Image (cartoon, rainbow, N blue to C red):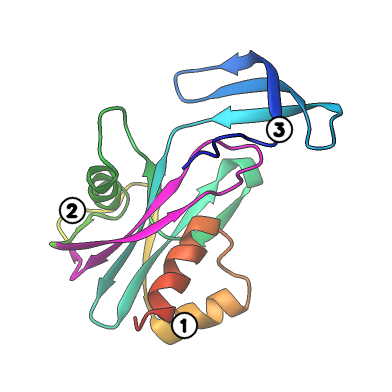
Amino acid sequence: MQDPEPPILTTGVTTAYASPWMRVEEHTVIDVDGKPGMYNVLHCGDGVCVLAVTGDDLYLIREYKYAIGRHILQLPSGGVDKGEEPLQAAMRELLEETGLTADIWTPLGLVHPYPTNIASAVHLFLALDARPVQAPEPGIELLPTSRSAVRRLIADNEVTHAASLVCLLTYLTNGG
């Protein structure tokens, strides 16, 4: 929901960079203190993050992330394609990345990863009774992990992907 009268007045918008996957805008504004300012806004489309569960196992993945130059533990995640609903994207991303599919899907809400500068949301999903139907995507290691091990990984700051943390914590604090 957008505020009817935002406290920051936009006075101009220019596109600084655009590709098929993202657009970076420079917004000139009159800030809440009445002074001129600027915001850089990244438009990269909405995304999804999926927690797949089978019995006692929660499925994490280990994948190399170019921008930070290292492998991380996270949940399967990706973008919502044009014309695609978030649930469709979640099903597609889970299958593409992990080779898993599931019959029972539950939305767990959404998260805005960095709302000062990124104009997108990540839709969170739970996929129950996940089962393998094909091999995981190359470069992705699928890690069935117990709930207690996931709790330890979170406590030890081993899971740093924001949407994955919100998805896992939502599930674990609601009886999962």
For numbered disc 3, what is the local secondary structure?
Answer: loop
Which range of residues does the magenta coloring cover?
Answer: 104-131
State the mark number for residue 27: none
Q: Name the residue under label 3.
A: 8
Q: Is residue 64 left or right of residue 58?
A: right
For numbered disc 2, what is the local secondary structure?
Answer: loop
In the image, residue 59 above or below residue 28: below
Residue 109 in magenta stretch: yes
Q: Name the residue under label 2.
A: 134
- The residue lying furthest to the bottom in this view is 148
In the image, residue 35 above or below residue 54: above
Q: Badge 3: how crowded within 10 Å, few (<14), some, or many (20+)?
A: some
In this view of the protein, which residue sits in the foreground, 77 or 112? 112
Residue 152 in magenta stretch: no
Residue shown at 58%/37% (left/top)? 118
Q: Where is residue 9 in the image (x, y as percent from the top left)?
A: 70, 26
Q: Which of marks 1 and 2 is nearer the N terminus?
A: 2
